Amino acid sequence: MNSRRNFLFKLALSAGAPLVLTSRLCGQAPPPVKLEETDPIAMALGYKEDSTKADATKFPQHKPEMICSGCTLYQGKPGDASGPCAAVGMKIVLAGGWCSVYAKKPDPVK
Ligand code: SF4
Protein backbone atom coordinates (compact mmCIF):
# COMPACT_ATOMS: atom_id res chain seq x y z
CA MET A 1 0.00 0.00 0.00
CA ASN A 2 1.50 3.36 -0.98
CA SER A 3 1.95 5.95 1.74
CA ARG A 4 -0.95 8.18 0.57
CA ARG A 5 -3.40 5.28 0.50
CA ASN A 6 -2.07 4.08 3.85
CA PHE A 7 -2.59 7.57 5.30
CA LEU A 8 -6.19 7.77 3.97
CA PHE A 9 -6.93 4.29 5.28
CA LYS A 10 -5.69 5.22 8.76
CA LEU A 11 -7.60 8.52 8.61
CA ALA A 12 -10.83 6.68 7.78
CA LEU A 13 -10.26 4.29 10.66
CA SER A 14 -9.62 7.08 13.12
CA ALA A 15 -12.49 9.29 11.88
CA GLY A 16 -15.74 7.39 11.68
CA ALA A 17 -15.17 3.80 10.82
CA PRO A 18 -15.04 2.56 14.43
CA LEU A 19 -18.43 4.11 15.15
CA VAL A 20 -19.99 2.57 12.05
CA LEU A 21 -18.38 -0.80 12.68
CA THR A 22 -19.38 -0.80 16.34
CA SER A 23 -22.98 0.09 15.56
CA ARG A 24 -23.10 -2.56 12.80
CA LEU A 25 -21.64 -5.21 15.06
CA CYS A 26 -24.13 -4.33 17.78
CA GLY A 27 -27.02 -4.47 15.31
CA GLN A 28 -27.77 -0.77 15.71
CA ALA A 29 -28.66 1.56 12.88
CA PRO A 30 -26.22 4.41 12.25
CA PRO A 31 -27.21 7.70 13.92
CA PRO A 32 -29.80 9.72 11.97
CA VAL A 33 -28.51 12.49 9.76
CA LYS A 34 -30.36 15.78 9.35
CA LEU A 35 -31.07 16.90 5.80
CA GLU A 36 -29.47 20.30 5.33
CA GLU A 37 -30.86 22.69 2.73
CA THR A 38 -27.37 22.78 1.21
CA ASP A 39 -27.33 19.01 0.67
CA PRO A 40 -27.23 18.31 -3.10
CA ILE A 41 -30.38 16.15 -2.82
CA ALA A 42 -32.19 18.92 -0.92
CA MET A 43 -31.13 21.50 -3.47
CA ALA A 44 -32.27 19.30 -6.35
CA LEU A 45 -35.68 18.84 -4.72
CA GLY A 46 -36.03 22.45 -3.58
CA TYR A 47 -36.24 21.34 0.07
CA LYS A 48 -36.80 24.10 2.61
CA GLU A 49 -36.92 23.55 6.37
CA ASP A 50 -39.75 26.08 6.45
CA SER A 51 -42.41 25.35 3.83
CA THR A 52 -43.30 29.04 3.58
CA LYS A 53 -39.78 29.69 2.23
CA ALA A 54 -40.26 27.47 -0.84
CA ASP A 55 -39.37 29.13 -4.13
CA ALA A 56 -42.79 30.02 -5.55
CA THR A 57 -41.33 30.95 -8.94
CA LYS A 58 -39.54 27.64 -9.38
CA PHE A 59 -42.30 25.57 -7.75
CA PRO A 60 -45.68 27.16 -8.60
CA GLN A 61 -47.46 23.98 -7.43
CA HIS A 62 -46.37 24.69 -3.84
CA LYS A 63 -48.95 25.76 -1.29
CA PRO A 64 -48.07 26.87 2.27
CA GLU A 65 -50.21 24.15 3.84
CA MET A 66 -48.07 21.48 2.15
CA ILE A 67 -45.64 20.41 4.87
CA CYS A 68 -43.51 17.32 5.41
CA SER A 69 -45.66 16.00 8.26
CA GLY A 70 -48.56 15.77 5.79
CA CYS A 71 -46.52 13.93 3.13
CA THR A 72 -46.73 10.17 2.52
CA LEU A 73 -42.94 9.95 2.44
CA TYR A 74 -42.53 11.41 5.94
CA GLN A 75 -41.79 8.70 8.52
CA GLY A 76 -42.04 10.79 11.70
CA LYS A 77 -44.82 10.28 14.23
CA PRO A 78 -47.69 12.77 14.53
CA GLY A 79 -46.58 15.69 16.67
CA ASP A 80 -42.85 15.11 16.16
CA ALA A 81 -40.84 18.18 15.20
CA SER A 82 -38.93 16.16 12.62
CA GLY A 83 -38.62 12.71 11.16
CA PRO A 84 -36.99 10.58 8.49
CA CYS A 85 -38.01 11.00 4.86
CA ALA A 86 -38.03 8.10 2.41
CA ALA A 87 -37.36 10.42 -0.55
CA VAL A 88 -33.99 11.55 0.80
CA GLY A 89 -32.45 8.34 2.09
CA MET A 90 -34.19 8.53 5.45
CA LYS A 91 -32.37 11.71 6.41
CA ILE A 92 -34.21 13.80 8.99
CA VAL A 93 -36.46 16.57 7.67
CA LEU A 94 -38.41 19.11 9.67
CA ALA A 95 -42.16 18.51 10.07
CA GLY A 96 -42.82 22.01 8.72
CA GLY A 97 -40.53 21.58 5.72
CA TRP A 98 -41.36 20.94 2.10
CA CYS A 99 -39.83 19.70 -1.14
CA SER A 100 -41.00 19.31 -4.73
CA VAL A 101 -41.85 15.60 -4.44
CA TYR A 102 -44.42 16.26 -1.73
CA ALA A 103 -47.29 13.78 -1.93
CA LYS A 104 -50.26 14.47 0.34
CA LYS A 105 -51.17 11.73 2.80
CA PRO A 106 -54.63 10.37 2.12
CA ASP A 107 -57.35 11.75 4.33
CA PRO A 108 -58.24 9.41 7.21
CA VAL A 109 -61.24 7.13 6.58
CA LYS A 110 -64.25 8.30 8.56
S1 SF4 B 1 -40.71 14.02 0.20
FE1 SF4 B 1 -42.27 14.81 1.59
S2 SF4 B 1 -41.44 14.47 3.67
FE2 SF4 B 1 -39.74 14.28 2.22
S3 SF4 B 1 -38.82 16.33 2.17
FE3 SF4 B 1 -40.29 16.21 0.48
S4 SF4 B 1 -42.21 17.04 1.32
FE4 SF4 B 1 -40.87 16.55 3.06
Image: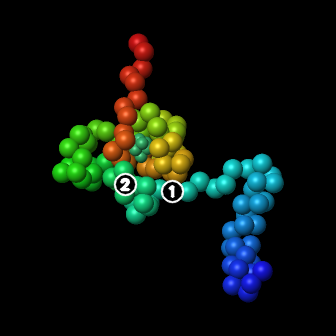
Nearer to us in this view, 53 or 77: 53
Q: Residue at x 69, y 68 (%)?
A: 16
**Disc 1, SS:** loop
Q: Identify residue type, mark 2.
A: Ala
Is 94 located above or below residue 63 in the figure?
below
Residue at 42%, 60% (x, y): give it.
Answer: 40
Element type where label 2 sits in the image: helix
How far across and down, in percent of the image, does residue 89 sit? 53, 48
Q: Nearer the viewer, residue 6 or 109?
A: 6
Residue 6 picture location, percent across and down: 74, 81
Residue 90: x %, y % from top left:
54, 47
Quadrant of the rendered image holding ligand 1: top left
Does any portion of residue 79 appear in the rendered image? no
78 sits left or right of 13 in the view: left
* Residue that label 1 marks: 34
Q: Position of residue 99 (x, y in %)?
A: 35, 47
Going by the picture, which residue comes out furthest to the left? 57
Residue under the image location 51 percent in, 42 percent down? 86
Indicate the amino acid at tag 1.
Lys
The answer to whether 105 appears left or right of 51 in the picture is right
- Mark 2, residues whose alpha carbon is within 10 Å: few (<14), some, or many (≥20)? few
Quarter of the image for the C terminus: give it: top left
In the rendered image, the vertical position of residue 60 relative to residue 13, given as above or below: above
Q: Residue furthest right?
A: 25
- The numbered disc on residue 44 is 2
Residue located 55% across and 57% down the image: 33
